[in-house]
C-alpha cells in the first residue's frame, strides 16, 4: 500500500550527496532504478533527476521488517529513504558521482508502486522511438533526456536574464491570430462566435513584434511557441519554440552584436566553451559559391571550386551542355577517397542523384598515382592535368564534378561534401563553428507559384542601393537579412525591417500583392506605420535546434518534453483525434469523409 509523506521532508537530491555528507542523516526520495538481493545483502539504487545513489542493507545491521520491505521493492517504485551517509564498504563505482558513498537506511517508505515498465529506464535506450514516445512520461525519466531538458531550462533562464540585463522587455503576443498565408501553411482554429471564420496559430510573432516597436517598447523578446503546418522533414516539429526579439533604432550590426554576446554567454556558462567574437561573417553569395549552402558547415573545408573555364572546350557532353545552357561546372576534392573501388564511387553517384544530379563525374587518384576517370575518353592529358592542379589533387584524392544549373550544382556538391565529411567522421558534435550569413537575396523564384516570393519575409528591408530594382529586377535585390548558423544548421535568422511605406508598397507589388490584398492581410501593420515608426530590426532563434546542438543530441525530439512524431502525431495522447459531432455542430463545421 502506498504510504504518504506524513511530515517527511526531502533533505537532498540523490546526486547531490558526496563524501562531505558522510555521517549525516539524510532523507532522499526517488524511483528505484534497480534492486539486487544477494541473500541477506540488499542493494537498492535510487534515482531522481540529479542522479543515482546506492542504499545497502544487510542482516546484521537491519531489522527483519526493513529487510523485507527493501526486498519487496521493484523497479520504478517511488520511495523515501531516511538513513546515514557512509563511505562505501565495497568497491567504488567510478561511473557515479555518488560512487564512493552509500546510504545505510533507518526507514524506507514506499510512496507508490509501479507496474513493470514497457522498457528499461536507462541511458542510451535501445528501445524503438515509437514505443518511447507512446510512453513519453517514462522516457522522460531517462537520464539523457533529463539532462537535455535541464540544459534547455538553463538556456531559457540565462536568455531571460541576459536579455533583461540588456534592456529587453518580455512581452507575450497572441496565439490566436489572423491567417496570413505568405510563408508556410497556417494551423487554423475555428471560431464558434463567428461560424465560418478561423483564427490561425502564429508561424512567428513577426507582425506583433513590429507593432510593439511602433508602440515604443524598443527592445522586446519572448520565448514564443510557433506553428507551421508543413510536411515534416526528418527534424521538424509542427510546433516549436523561438527565442524571438526585436529592437528599435538599430541596424544589422547592433542586432548581431547583442546576439553574439548572448551566444557567448550561453556557451560559456552552460558548456564552458568560449566563442571567439566577433563571429565570422560570410555573404550569401560566397557561402553558396564556396560551400553550396546558405548554412555552410565550416568545421571542415572540401570547398566547391569552379572549373568551368578549364572545361569550356571539353568534348564531354555533360560539361558542354551544362555550360552552353548557362549552367556551371564545379568540383570538390574528397581527400583520402581516391582508392575507392567502382562500387564505392557509384554509391556517391547515387547519393548525388538523390540530390537532383543527373550524374556525377570523377577523377580518382590512387595512392600510387594512377588516375581513373569517368570521362577519361573525352579529356586530353592537358585538360586532366589542369583539372587536377586546380583541385589540388594529390595521390589518394577523389575529385567529384557536377555540371548543371547553378542551384543544382550547389545542392549536389553541398550535400555531397557533408555526406563525405560525415562518412569520414569529420562532423564532431563537440566542435562548435558559428557563422553569420548575410546579404541574402530579397526574393527567390517559386516555380510552383510562378512568382517571386520573399526569401525571408515581406517586411525585410532591401539594400538601399537595390530598392530601385524591386520591380524592374527583383532577382538582383539583396536583403538586409542575416542568419546565424552553427555547424551547418541555421539556428536563427532575422532582418532589418522596412519602415517606409513607399518601400513596403513596392515590396508587396513585387510579391504580386494588390493593394487590397496587402491591406486585407497586413492592414493593421501598414496602418500603424502611418503613425510614426522607428527603424527596427530583429532576429529569432529556433530554440529546439539550438538546444539540440548544445546537448549534442541527434534529434530535435530529444530536447522537447512532449514532441510529435514525423507524421505530426502525439503518440502518447493520440492527437490529433476525431471530435464529437456536437463540437463540430457548435462550430458550424462539416467534415468530408476521405478514404484512408
Ligand atoms: N520571424 C522571423 C522568422 O520566424 C524571424 C525574424 O525575422 O525575426 O523566421
Image (cartoon, grey):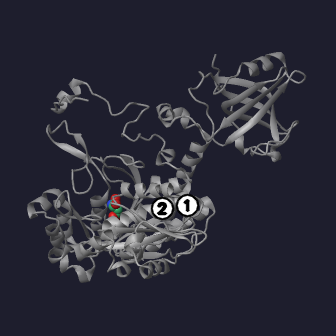
Q: Which mark is residue 192?
A: none
**Percent position of residue 544, x then y:** 46, 52
What is the CA distance from the residue labelled 2 to the residue labelled 1?
8 Å
- Disc 2 and disc 1 in contact, CB within 8 angstroms: yes
The answer to whether residue 443 is above or below residue 15 is below
Q: Is mark 1 within 8 Å of ligand 1?
A: no
Above or below, comparing residue 324 to residue 88 in the picture: below
Camera-nearest label, 2 or 1: 2
- Name which quarter of the figure residue 335 lies in: bottom right
| In the displayed structure image, the side of residue 106 where residue 253 appears, left or right | left
Q: Residue at x 51, y 65 (%)?
A: 263
The answer to whether residue 592 is left or right of residue 418 is: left
The extreme right residue here reads 60
Give the mark, 2 or 1, whose residue is nearer the N terminus.
2
Residue under label 1, please give it: 427
Please tell me whether mark 2 sits on a helix, a strand or a loop. helix
| Number of the label disc, if any, that sits on residue 418 | 2
Q: Which quadrant of the picture is home to ligand 1?
A: bottom left
Can residue 491 be seen in this snapshot?
no
Q: Secondary structure at mark 1?
A: loop
Could you classify mark 2 by the number of other residues whose Cα lies within 10 Å: few (under 14), some (14-19), or many (20 or more)? some
Amino acid at each position: 500500500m502506498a504510504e504518504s509523506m506524513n511530515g517527511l521532508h526531502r533533505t537532498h537530491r540523490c546526486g547531490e550527496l558526496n563524501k562531505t555528507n558522510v555521517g549525516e542523516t539524510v532523507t532522499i526520495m526517488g524511483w528505484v532504478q534497480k534492486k539486487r538481493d544477494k541473500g541477506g545483502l540488499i542493494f537498492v539504487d535510487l534515482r531522481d533527476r540529479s542522479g543515482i545513489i546506492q542504499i545497502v542493507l544487510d542482516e546484521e545491521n537491519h531489522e527483519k521488517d526493513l529487510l523485507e520491505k527493501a526486498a519487496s521493492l521493484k523497479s520504478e517504485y517511488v520511495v523515501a529513504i531516511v538513513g546515514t551517509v557512509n563511505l562505501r564498504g565495497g568497491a567504488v563505482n567510478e561511473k557515479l558521482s555518488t560512487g564512493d558513498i552509500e546510504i545505510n537506511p533507518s526507514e524506507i517508505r514506499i510512496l507508490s508502486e509501479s507496474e513493470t515498465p514497457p522498457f528499461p529506464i536507462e541511458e542510451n535506450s535501445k528501445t524503438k522511438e515509437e514505443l518511447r514516445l507512446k510512453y513519453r512520461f517514462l522516457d522522460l525519466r531517462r537520464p539523457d533526456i533529463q539532462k537535455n531538458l535541464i540544459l534547455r531550462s538553463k538556456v531559457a533562464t540565462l536568455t531571460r536574464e541576459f536579455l533583461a540585463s540588456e534592456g529587453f522587455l518580455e512581452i507575450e503576443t497572441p496565439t490566436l491570430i489572423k491567417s496570413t498565408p505568405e510563408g508556410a501553411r497556417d494551423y487554423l482554429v475555428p471560431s464558434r462566435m463567428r461560424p465560418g471564420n478561423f483564427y490561425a496559430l502564429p508561424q512567428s510573432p513577426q507582425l506583433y513584434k513590429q507593432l510593439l516597436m511602433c508602440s515604443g517598447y524598443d527592445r522586446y523578446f519572448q520565448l514564443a511557441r510557433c506553428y507551421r503546418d508543413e510536411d515534416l522533414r526528418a527534424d521538424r516539429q509542427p510546433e516549436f519554440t523561438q527565442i524571438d526579439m526585436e529592437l528599435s533604432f538599430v541596424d544589422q550590426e547592433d542586432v548581431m552584436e547583442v546576439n553574439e554576446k548572448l551566444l557567448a554567454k550561453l556557451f560559456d556558462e552552460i558548456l564552458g566553451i568560449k566563442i571567439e567574437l566577433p563571429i565570422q561573417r560570410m555573404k550569401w553569395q560566397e557561402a553558396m559559391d564556396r560551400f553550396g549552402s546558405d548554412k555552410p558547415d565550416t568545421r571542415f573545408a572540401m570547398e566547391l571550386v569552379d572549373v568551368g573555364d578549364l572545361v569550356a572546350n571539353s568534348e564531354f557532353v555533360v560539361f558542354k551542355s551544362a555550360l552552353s545552357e548557362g549552367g556551371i561546372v564545379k568540383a570538390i576534392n574528397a581527400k583520402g577517397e581516391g582508392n575507392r573501388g567502382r562500387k564505392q564511387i557509384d554509391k556517391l553517384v547515387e547519393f548525388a542523384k538523390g540530390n537532383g544530379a543527373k550524374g556525377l563525374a570523377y577523377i580518382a587518384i590512387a595512392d600510387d598515382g594512377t588516375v581513373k576517370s569517368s570521362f577519361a575518353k573525352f579529356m586530353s592529358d592537358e585538360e586532366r592535368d589542369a583539372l587536377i592542379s586546380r583541385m589540388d589533387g594529390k595521390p589518394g584524392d577523389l575529385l567529384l564534378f557536377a555540371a548543371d544549373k547553378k542551384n543544382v550544382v550547389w545542392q549536389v556538391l553541398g550535400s555531397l561534401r557533408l555526406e563525405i565529411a560525415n562518412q569520414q567522421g569529420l562532423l564532431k558534435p563537440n566542435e562548435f563553428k558559428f557563422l553569420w550569413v548575410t546579404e541574402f537575396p530579397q526574393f527567390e523564384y517559386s516555380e510552383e507559384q510562378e512568382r517571386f516570393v520573399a526569401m525571408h519575409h515581406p517586411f525585410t528591408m532591401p539594400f538601399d542601393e537595390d530598392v530601385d530594382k524591386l520591380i524592374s529586377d527583383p532577382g538582383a535585390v539583396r536583403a538586409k537579412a542575416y542568419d546565424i548558423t552553427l555547424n551547418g544548421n541555421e539556428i536563427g535568422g532575422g532582418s532589418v525591417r522596412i519602415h517606409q511605406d513607399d518601400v513596403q508598397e513596392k515590396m508587396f507589388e513585387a510579391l504580386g500583392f494588390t493593394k487590397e490584398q496587402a491591406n486585407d492581410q497586413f492592414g493593421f501593420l501598414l496602418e500603424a506605420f502611418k503613425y510614426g515608426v522607428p527603424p527596427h530590426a530583429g532576429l529569432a532563434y529556433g530554440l529546439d535546434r539550438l538546444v539540440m546542438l548544445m546537448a549534442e543530441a541527434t534529434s530535435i525530439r530529444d530536447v522537447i518534453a512532449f514532441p510529435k512524431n514525423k507524421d505530426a502525431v502525439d503518440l502518447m495522447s493520440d492527437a490529433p483525434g476525431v471530435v464529437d459531432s456536437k463540437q463540430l455542430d457548435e462550430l458550424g463545421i462539416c467534415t468530408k469523409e476521405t478514404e484512408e
